[in-house]
Image (spheres, grey):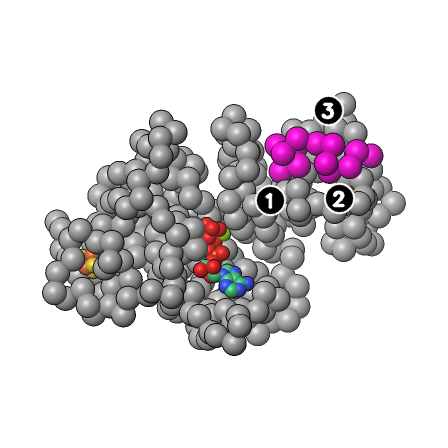
């Protein structure tokens, strides 16, 4: 399969209070045409930073790319200053803060339509909006397009953001925790909608999430992030049946706690603290399988054709 996106050895730092902190270290990742790729990992592991870097918006956030390349269908994204909106689109975590609260839904749509389709569709704006809403199963009876965002439920707001994202007929959709503010039923509906978009429009997805159940049911392949590093990558089935990294195993081990709504296991989930970044393996302070080699940063170890891990401990 052809690669849509290639991220190669990307390192990113934020500068705040005169101090530079590296939060992505040599991260590499690819997405093939039609693939759904997931990034899983705890809070602060760098998932959103990677999305922002791919979307070329990291510099708007006091971030800076220290090194590496990102290409889309072979075209360099980092040095390309032109918007990439038609090919890649973004669905953010919080729909409420992504829609303009001062304007009704119709105006929110109109602004995007004017950006993407000025020549062809401006006069037919209501038809374009209705078509877009139909794609996300929102009928004009269910939704008054003259309503303001705050008058709608979280699920409706998220559907509207998805409809807005689809206006540009994207090839790649980057969805950053798209369901974390929704209840379980609405979350399932949104994921069903993603499946339809994937099969109906042939779009690829990069989904970042804390929710392993979601990643398991939607993604073909998963990258596990820990403290700004990829620690394991595998096809989804392979990752769940044959996890290699102690952190991946801990995440999977904690899954029943999520479905049972018990407290999360601290071993698997606690925010990354970059101030106390160990010099060798970044997971060493929490690892129950560490050995003398772990004071050196682990190298990539191939497990099978599409499965690799960064860990010194050979467990199989
Ligand atoms: N604008 C910023 N300035 C300084 N540090 C930042 C900034 N944005 C993020 N960070 C830090 O960078 C690290 C990675 O953050 P990021 O938001 O990418 O993580 P994440 O995996 O998306 O977390 P979450 O799951 O909570 O969304 C964190 O330590 C975070 O505090
Ligand atoms: S390299 Fe060592 S410390 Fe790091 S995860 Fe593997 S066993 Fe644990
Ligand atoms: Mg995030």
> What secondary structure is marked by label 2?
loop
First in sequence, mark 3 or 1: give its number: 1
Q: Is residue 254 left or right of residue 2?
A: left
Q: Is residue 206 left or right of residue 80?
A: left
The residue to which callout 2 is attached is 101
> Residue drawn 28% across and 66% down?
278
> Residue drawn 23% across and 59% down?
284
Q: Nearer the viewer, residue 261 or 162?
A: 261
Q: CA distance from mark 3 to mark 2?
A: 20 Å
User: Is 229 above or below relative to 76?
Assistant: above
Mark number, residue 94: 1
Q: Nearer the viewer, residue 49 or 117?
A: 49
Q: Nearer the viewer, residue 233 or 295?
A: 295
First in sequence, mark 3 or 2: give its number: 2
Q: CA distance from mark 3 to mark 1?
A: 22 Å
Magenta: main secondary structure equals helix
The residue to which callout 3 is attached is 142
Circle 3: is it few (<14), some (14-19), or many (20+) Cα within 10 Å? few
Image quadrant where residue 210 sits: top left
First in sequence, mark 1 or 2: give its number: 1
Q: Position of residue 187 (x, y in %)?
A: 52, 32
């Amino acid at each position: 399969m052809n690669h849509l996106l290639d991220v190669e050895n990307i390192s990113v730092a934020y500068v705040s209070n005169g101090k530079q902190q590296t939060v992505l270290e040599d991260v590499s990742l690819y997405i093939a045409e039609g693939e759904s790729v997931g990034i899983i990992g705890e809070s602060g592991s760098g998932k959103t930073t990677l999305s922002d870097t791919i979307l070329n918006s990291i510099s708007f956030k006091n971030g800076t790319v220290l090194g590496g390349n990102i290409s889309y269908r072979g075209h360099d994204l980092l040095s390309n200053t032109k918007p990439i909106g038609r090919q890649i689109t973004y669905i953010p975590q919080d729909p409420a803060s992504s829609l303009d609260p001062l304007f009704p839904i119709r105006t929110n749509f109109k602004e995007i339509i004017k950006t993407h389709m000025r020549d062809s569709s401006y006069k037919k704006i209501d038809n374009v909006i209705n078509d877009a809403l139909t794609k996300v199963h929102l009928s004009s009876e269910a939704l008054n397009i003259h309503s303001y965002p705050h008058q709608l439920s979280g699920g409706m707001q998220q559907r509207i953001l998805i409809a807005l994202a689809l206006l540009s007929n994207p090839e790649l959709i980057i969805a950053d925790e798209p369901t974390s503010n929704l209840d379980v039923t609405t979350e399932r509906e949104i994921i069903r909608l993603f499946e339809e978009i994937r099969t109906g429009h042939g779009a690829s997805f990069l989904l970042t999430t804390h929710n392993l159940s979601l990643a398991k049911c939607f993604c073909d392949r998963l990258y596990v992030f820990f403290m700004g590093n990829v620690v394991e990558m595998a096809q989804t089935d392979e990752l769940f049946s044959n996890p290699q990294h102690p952190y991946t195993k801990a995440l999977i081990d904690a899954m029943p706690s999520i479905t049972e709504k018990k407290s999360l296991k601290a071993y698997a989930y606690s925010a990354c603290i970059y101030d106390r970044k160990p010099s060798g393996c970044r997971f060493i302070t929490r690892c129950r399988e560490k050995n003398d080699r772990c004071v050196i940063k682990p190298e990539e170890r191939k497990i099978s054709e599409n499965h690799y891990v960064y860990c010194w401990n050979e467990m199989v």
